Image (tube, grey):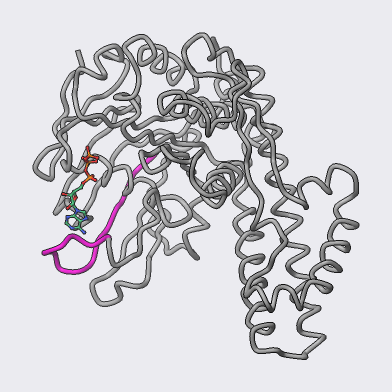
Amino acid sequence: MATPARAAGRAPVRFRRLALMDFRSYARAEVALDGRPVALFGPNGAGKTNLLEALSLLGPGRGLRSARLDELPRVGGAGGWAVSARLDVAGEERRLGVGAAASAPDRRICRIDETAAAGPAALAEHVRFLWLTPAQDRLFTDSPGERRRFLDRMALARNPAQARAAADYELAMRQRQRLLDERSRDEAWLAALETRMAEAGVALAAARRETASALAAAEIAAGDEDAGFPAADIALEGELEAALDAAPAAEVEEAFAERLRRNRAADAAAGRALIGPHRSDLLVTHRQKGTPARACSTGEQKALLIGLVLANARALALSARFRAGASAPLVLLLDEIAAHLDKDRRAALFDILDGLDFQVFMTGTDKSLFAAWGARAQGFAVEDGGLTETTLT
Ligand SMILES: Nc1ncnc2c1ncn2[C@@H]1O[C@H](COP(=O)(O)OP(=O)(O)OP(=O)(O)O)[C@@H](O)[C@H]1O
């Protein structure tokens, strides 16, 4: 079946070459990629996740482990690190690079086509990543914060401008709290910060609503249920998200700013803002069973998560913004997914991934996990800080 990206005549993103230098367990590694999906296999600790993390740092944000910069240079190396890649983006060659010099380890340097980029956000023009890692296995049982971050990451892949709203909101909230903690009576400054929180907060809530409804639409359109990835019903729990159902954004902003003003004493006493989109939650229900995700089995939760990430990828492919070419192509990083799935579900997943037309990188401990992908994927054995290309069959 033709995917929307193919139907629109857009060449998807394809990594052609990836090079790591003094990055985590890699002293020096270089791989040539031919455009097929990539399967990385090797024993525990071989460096599979490190490689996915290296890729994820070529996009905006702190990468798939949310690591601090000082964790990235290879222990025993010179102190600096670098990840560079050559990729085809919509038919054009791009060179992206990130890293830090030993002399300035706290400063992440980003390069696009050999020119210094303003910052990591500029990378989003060229490539965006969605990932699923074992750290997300407890997403449905963890605190709402994890689910919010998961949703916000998906929203970010749709629209990188959302990063700005999230950062503005956090900053204004922190500054306001500092004033409240200091018992400041600077009315004008407090009101200005509350206005900024309201503007950024409503933008954030609106982006989440857009993502959630695109996800819901993609979940409905998906026929993945047969393949073992259960459809999910998605709902947002949050005051601003709900308020946007009933009123235009400007009104919601005004009402939120007013509530913040009235809540100053309570927020000062609590030491944090008691209301706002930083308290929202993503509620996921296993549609067929009608059970909240947190009450599903571990395996069912994993299948629901995979289904959600696939739905988001599909929603992105369908979005008008993506088709218009204004949005960067997506790369999916799936860390240790294969082991959770039985043979049939694995084979079904490979079929779905082939149809998505996003480049996919998948890891697993054993080559046999990828046998059903066969020649459709490019295989690499990861061991001793290096990668060796090998057939998967
Ligand atoms: N900064 C660093 N310098 C050197 N080695 C590091 C650094 N950071 C992590 N490592 C090493 O990298 C290895 C982990 O690699 P990685 O998480 O990629 O393994 P993996 O192949 O994904 O394993 P698993 O199958 O267990 O998930 C560990 O041995 C860890 O000690």
Is 162 situated above or below 194?
A: above
The image quadrant that residue 71 belongs to is bottom left
* Percent coordinates x, y for residue 212 in the rendering: 67, 36
* Percent coordinates x, y for residue 215 in the rendering: 64, 31
* Percent coordinates x, y for residue 38 in the rendering: 30, 28
Specify whether 190 is left or right of 285. right
Is 255 situated above or below 187?
A: above
Specify whether 368 is left or right of 189. left
Q: Is residue 77 magenta?
A: yes
Q: Is residue 14 magenta?
A: no
Task: Name the residue rendered at 64%, 54% in the picture.
Answer: 161
Task: Name the residue rendered at 47%, 38% in the picture.
Answer: 89
Magenta extent:
72-87
Mark count:
0
Task: Name the residue rendered at 13%, 41% in the picture.
Answer: 386
* Percent coordinates x, y for residue 83 in the rendering: 29, 53
Specify whether 297 is left or right of 3. left
- The quarter in which the N terminus is drawn is top right
- 107, 203: nearer the viewer: 203
Specify whether 345 is left or right of 239. left
- The quarter in which the C terminus is drawn is top left
Is 57 situated above or below 15?
A: below
Task: Name the residue rendered at 70%, 73% in the picture.
Answer: 267
- 360, 347: nearer the viewer: 347
